[in-house]
Image (spheres, helix red, strand yellow):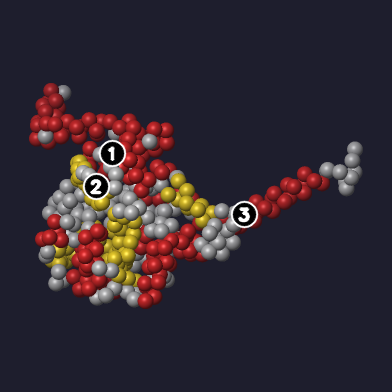
């Protein structure tokens, strides 16, 4: 038998000790970076933008959504956690009123998803010499992303809802930070994106924000998969709805593809709340206390294309005052917003989500959709062929017979 010091009795213990210490070190480091966020990650990318050590990388997660993880080169500075919107603790006080809003300009309305609030607000800022950051369809990159807008002629690119998570890359975040130092900036985005930008610039007095009433967002990778299936190249614009209907319209150099939202797998999944990021189903921003200076969304109590506009701060009140000359604003009690569920709580996760997710990992978007929602797909096909009136009549006859 070997004695201590003669051979290898201490070596395993030494190795175990080193492994233990290394594990403790990694655990300590993981508690001071976005490694602790896990599936609460909202995919905004602000952590990657601020990391000087370039220790944060983009990865794919559930339903092909983008999440961020930490490499071993992390220097444990904690900056990524400080800017992460998931750690947001400061919200505006909830309001007891909102405005039913609609643009006075018919041309603006015809190209807007609802009342044209985003366009009219952006127009005011640009007329004053400031810049706007909002989601657009990027022709060069063939995706929805946030971009800087300085000219009135470019505002048409922000019109229309984008039912997908927009990409905000590092250069855009740095550009926002620079613009906030030099002058006023209007940022329009999902609440998590608004919180990320606020954290980036320490909620500067020069930053004005508009958060959207958001049910949740699918990954841009899902949209790319749908577009690839349709075999549409060189897309110039994509629109997910007009003012009164959910119609997907994709315009390319060669064609215009239009379809009812419920007849398109990607869009139908969105409308059924089944393709969102995991974090969307437990979103901390879906509540009455908002992060944006104003909150905008559809006013769902009617089908006339109005928007709702909620001022949440002094800066928000300032924005609203500027809109009275270009918009019809009608003050309402906040209780009239009860139909806008995302103003009160996150979207509830349906049981079909897990089934779709399992099938998606095996078969991809299209087949997973039809296997999960085949009954809905059949119903929508019949509706398209016979019309809603005939469908309802036949359905009532079957009920009477049963």
Local SS, label 3: helix
**Displayed quadrant of residue 132:** bottom left
For marks 2 and 3, the one nearer the N-term is: 3
Residue under numbered circle 3 = 26
| Mark 2 residue element | strand
Residues at marks 2 and 3 touching, judged by CB atoms closer than 8 Å: no
Left or right of 107 in this view: 10: right
In this rendering, is residue 220 above or below 121?
Answer: above
> Image point 34% across, 76% down: which residue?
183
Label 3 or label 1, whichever lies nearer to me, is 1
Please provide percent x and percent y for residue 176. 38, 68
Residue 388: x and y in percent read 12, 36
Residue at position x 90%, y 38% from top?
Answer: 1
Residue 13 in view here: yes
Return the residue at label 2.
252
Query: Where does label 1 land, which residue?
Result: 230
Q: Secondary structure at mark 1?
A: helix
Query: Residues under labels 3 and 1: Cα distance?
Result: 45 Å
* Nearer-N-terminus badge (2/1): 1
Q: Between 391 and 147, which is closer to the camera in this rendering?
A: 147
Res. 369 image quadrant = top left
Q: Number of callouts in the render? A: 3
Q: Is residue 40 above or below residue 181?
A: above
In the image, what residue occupies the spot 53% across and 59% down?
Answer: 54
Q: Quadrant of residue 64?
A: top left
Badge nearest the viewer, 2 or 1: 2
């Amino acid at each position: 038998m070997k004695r201590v010091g003669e051979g290898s009795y201490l070596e395993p213990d030494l190795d175990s000790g080193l492994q233990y210490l290394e594990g403790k070190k990694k655990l300590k480091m993981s508690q001071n970076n976005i490694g602790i966020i896990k599936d609460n990650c909202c995919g905004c990318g602000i952590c990657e933008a601020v990391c000087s050590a370039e220790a944060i990388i983009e990865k794919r997660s559930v339903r092909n959504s983008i999440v961020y993880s930490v490499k071993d080169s992390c220097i444990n500075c904690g900056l990524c956690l400080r800017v992460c919107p998931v750690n947001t603790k400061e919200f505006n006080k909830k309001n007891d009123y909102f405005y039913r809003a609609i643009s006075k300009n018919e041309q603006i309305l015809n190209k807007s998803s609802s009342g044209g609030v985003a366009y009219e607000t952006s127009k005011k800022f640009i007329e004053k010499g400031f810049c706007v950051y909002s989601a657009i369809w990027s022709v060069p990159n063939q995706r929805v992303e946030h971009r800087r807008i300085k000219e009135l002629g470019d505002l048409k690119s922000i019109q229309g809802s984008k039912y997908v998570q927009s990409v905000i890359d590092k250069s855009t975040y740095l550009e926002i930070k620079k613009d906030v130092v030099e002058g006023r900036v209007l940022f329009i985005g999902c609440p998590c994106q608004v919180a990320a930008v606020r954290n980036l610039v320490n909620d500067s007095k020069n930053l004005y924000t508009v958060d959207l009433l958001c049910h949740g967002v699918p990954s841009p990778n899902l949209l790319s998969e749908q577009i690839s299936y349709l075999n549409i190249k060189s897309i110039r614009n994509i629109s997910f709805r007009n003012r009164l209907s959910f119609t997907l319209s994709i315009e390319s150099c060669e064609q215009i593809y239009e379809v009812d939202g419920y007849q398109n797998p990607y869009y139908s999944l969105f409308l059924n709340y089944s393709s969102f990021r995991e974090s969307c189903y437990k979103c901390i921003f879906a509540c009455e206390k908002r992060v944006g200076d104003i909150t905008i969304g559809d006013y769902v109590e009617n089908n006339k294309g109005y928007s709702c506009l909620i001022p949440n701060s002094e800066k928000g009140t300032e924005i609203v005052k500027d809109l009275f000359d270009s918009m019809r604003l009608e003050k309402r009690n906040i209780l009239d917003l009860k139909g806008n569920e995302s103003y009160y709580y996150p979207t509830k996760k349906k049981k079909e989500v897990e089934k779709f997710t399992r099938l998606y990992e095996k078969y991809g978007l299209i087949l997973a959709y039809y296997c999960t929602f085949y009954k809905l797909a059949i119903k929508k096909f019949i509706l398209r062929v016979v019309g809603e009136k005939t469908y309802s009549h036949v359905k009532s006859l079957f009920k009477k017979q049963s």
